[in-house]
Image (tube, helix red, strand yellow):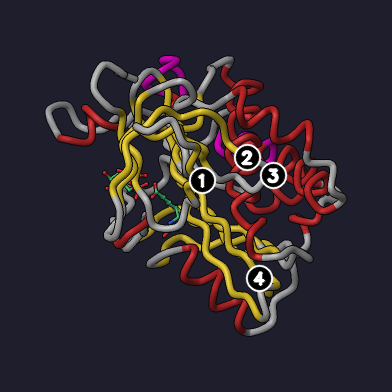
Amino acid sequence: MVNDGLNPDAIKGGLGQSLFATHIVYLETVDSTNRLAKELASAGAAEGAIVIVEEQTAGRGRRGRSWVSPGRANLTFSILLRPTLVVDKVFSLTMILALACIEAVKKRTGLSCMIKWPNDLYVGGKKLAGILTEFAARDRRVEWVVLGLGLNVNWYPAEGETMSRLATSLQAEIGKRVSRNELLVEILVQFEAYYNDVLSGRIEKVYERWNDFSLVLGKQVVIESDQLKITGKALRIDQDGALIIEDGEGKEQKIIHGEVSLRFGEGAPL
Ligand code: ATP
Ligand code: BTN
């Protein structure tokens, strides 16, 4: 049954023996789940802690952007991980959270969504979800990673507002409310399986999948950051999660996700 509140006991029960059942922080309101998860990380919390909230008062996207999400409608949560990984591989974790989300959404709603590299999920030209990845490292080895997901579930962005043109939700797409508790459990179960693949080096299948679900491949794209602007054709996403594009001179360029934005070039609508 689709109820209105997140239920940490039901989530814990649904997760069974999962890594993510061990330390669930559930709050009505927080400024940002990523901010709180990073605080837990600095205080020594173990891998697998998750922070789930009904409402964020200062949800964050990348590059100082804000994440807007009305209370009790959507999923906003963060996961704390302490993987044995070199920093170059951190972005593969963003990619597997995107895959886990795609599969959970498909299973729970039948809806197909795609990854808009580097960190968004789209359905039919509108943004459904975003991932914010933050980490700390020493000597190029990861100490902790916080993965934050904002997924629009039972929200109708108000008619006429900018958000209604840019964003969508599961309910808006399928016309039915969706259980956030069940969806969250499904995402975490799928994510854990992928996470084990990454940790044990079984990356081949995983990385084929993130190419299969990529919205950008074969399209003309413009990559921008404070320092650069490159136009080219998106060829593939490599095993580190970096985007490989062919620039105007036919040369391959590797774009690390960092602080770059991607938009589609002319003649390449979503
Ligand atoms: P890019 O990822 O290419 O830099 P982006 O616009 O998706 O571009 P992000 O930083 O990934 O930028 O995401 C933050 C943006 O997401 C905000 O600027 C806002 O436009 C949008 N946004 C905020 N809240 C939501 C939401 N609940 N659903 C969909 N989009 C949202
Ligand atoms: C983006 O699209 O740029 C990423 C948005 C990420 C939003 C989620 S909501 C849970 C977590 N806490 C935050 O403050 N941000 C992420």
Residues under labels 3 and 1: Cα distance? 30 Å
* For discs 3 and 1, the disc positioned in front in the rendered view: 1
Residue type at tag 2: Asp
Q: Are marks 3 and 2 in contact (CB under 8 Å)?
A: no
89 sits left or right of 19 in the view:
left
The residue located at (52%, 28%) in the rendering is 235
SS class, disc 4: strand
Q: Determine which residue is flagged by label 4.
A: 144
Residue type at tag 1: Lys
Up the image or down, 199 lies above or below 136; here it is above
Residues under labels 3 and 4: Cα distance? 18 Å
Where, quadrant-wise, is the N terminus in this rendering?
A: top right
1 or 4: tag closer to the N-terminus: 4
Mark number for residue 238? 2
Q: The magenta stretch spans which residues? A: 171-186
Mark number for residue 24? none
- Pick the front one: 160 or 201: 201
